[in-house]
Image: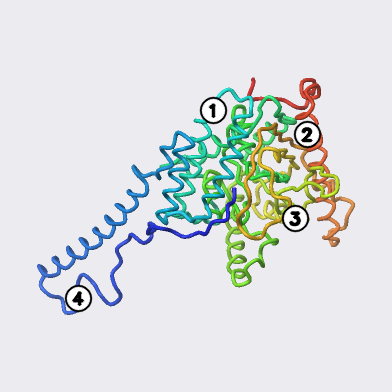
Amino acid sequence: MQLGVPQGPVLCCRKQLHCRKPPGRSCEPAHRPSQQSATVACRRQRQACSLQVQATAEAAKEARPSGLTPFAAVRSEEEFFGALQKGVDSGKLPKELYPAFQDFYNSYKQTVLSSDAPDASPELVAEVMGSIADRTFNQFLDPYTFPSYHTRLLEPYDYYKFGQNYVRTLINFDKSVVGHLDRFQKVQEQLDAGHNVVLLANHQTEADPGVWALLLEKVLPRLATEIIYVAGDRVVADPLCKPFSMGRNLFCVHSRKRMDDVPELKAEKMATNRRTLGAMVKELSKGGKLVWIAPSGGRDRPDPQSGEWLPHRYDPGAVELMRTMMAKSKKRGHLWPMAMYSWEVMPPPAGLEKNLGERRLTGYAGTGISLAEELDVDALLSGIPAEQKQERQQKLTETAWQAAVKEFKLISDAIHNDNVRSTSSMHTQPWKD
């Protein structure tokens, strides 16, 4: 999720709490006074550092009772907006956050209360939105910086469970499907054998990782949790989106679409991407890694003329990158085209927005994932000479994209047609077994 709010800590971050010696000073001066005076000086310095830590901790405690923000105790809509207004009035939250969260809250409330979910209630809405605001507020108090390779955070706060609890309320499981479950099982077998697997998937919403995990966690729990997502700028930079990203394994990159958004940061972004590529090679060299990449470079949008939703075309450079990364790893690798259907639960804005921040809309709807057949790279490229690199890349990419489009249409039909869903042999609902 992305909301247009500035970043930056309100309180000192953890790195600021370490007691550092001032330049040119030490607990033991150069002229070496008596041991007793040196001990006293060190004790005073430790006491000063202790007071600094204590003062900052007390300020944080005031903002986050019992280690959390006031939103953690929210149990009603009135309490939610009361806490939000208090945060804005105190200057601890930007004023732009109030209307953004108000819009988000109202959309989510309408979605949940109009659903047929058995536990749908105003209290559930308040508690889930309270947890989102709590984690967002925390990003202003103690902002998290993602490394090139981020592993999901489960303690002291379980960010994975946090994300799952939110996405679960948006999914109509009665209408959701998994296509070709046997292929997902094959992927698990490949991982168990120490092979690497890359999913060449379309990307529809920020809820996609949650959808993936919720549809697979009962029958293939390791696929649900051990997958690594190739993540772009927004999911690791926006304070509201970051908490959801913190619960996932990520390779963090800057997309080419946004490389020139801030010209003075281009060199830094390129350096980050080089570090991430190094981290990817290192992890793939271990074997048994499952990586999800969206070769289109972003979320799907509907056709402006017909309104039809289809996977956006894949970028040959992105597909070739993953093929090359696996080859460098010296471990056996597999490329699987994949289709994700989720746009109805969190439709993205109509166009690409360069600035962080967008209106958040939600819906209660069926979702689906499906794997096409694994790509036989050697067979696909056997008729194209090795020196024709562009043609080879285009052939592999077009084949992967067409396969994803085909599966997307099939799961869309199963989601929206009760008869197709109930009679299809290729679409199942493993969470009901």
**Quadrant in the picture for residue 274:** bottom right
How far separated are the C-alphas under marks 2 and 1? 29 Å
How far separated are the C-alphas under marks 4 and 1? 66 Å
N-terminal-most mark, 1 or 3: 1
For residue 335, above or below residue 412: below
How far separated are the C-alphas under marks 4 and 3? 59 Å
N-terminal-most mark, 2 or 1: 1
**Quadrant in the picture for residue 258:** bottom right
N-terminal-most mark, 4 or 1: 4
Q: Which residue is mark 2?
A: 412
**Quadrant in the picture for residue 345:** top right
Badge nearest the viewer, 4 or 1: 1
Q: Secondary structure at mark 3?
A: helix
For residue 14, above or below residue 126: below
Label placed on residue 320: 3
Q: Amino acid at mark 1?
A: Ser
Q: Amino acid at mark 3?
A: Glu
Contact, CB < 8 Å: mark 2 with mark 1? Answer: no
Residue 324 place in picture, x, y as percent: 71, 55
Contact, CB < 8 Å: mark 4 with mark 3? Answer: no
Badge nearest the viewer, 3 or 2: 2
Q: Which residue is mark 1?
A: 121
Q: Amino acid at mark 4?
A: Pro
Badge nearest the viewer, 1 or 3: 1
Q: Which residue is mark 4?
A: 29
How far separated are the C-alphas under marks 2 and 4? 74 Å
How far separated are the C-alphas under marks 1 and 3? 47 Å
Q: Secondary structure at mark 4?
A: loop
The residue closer to the viewer here, 329 or 296, is: 296
The residue closer to the viewer here, 22 or 93, is: 93
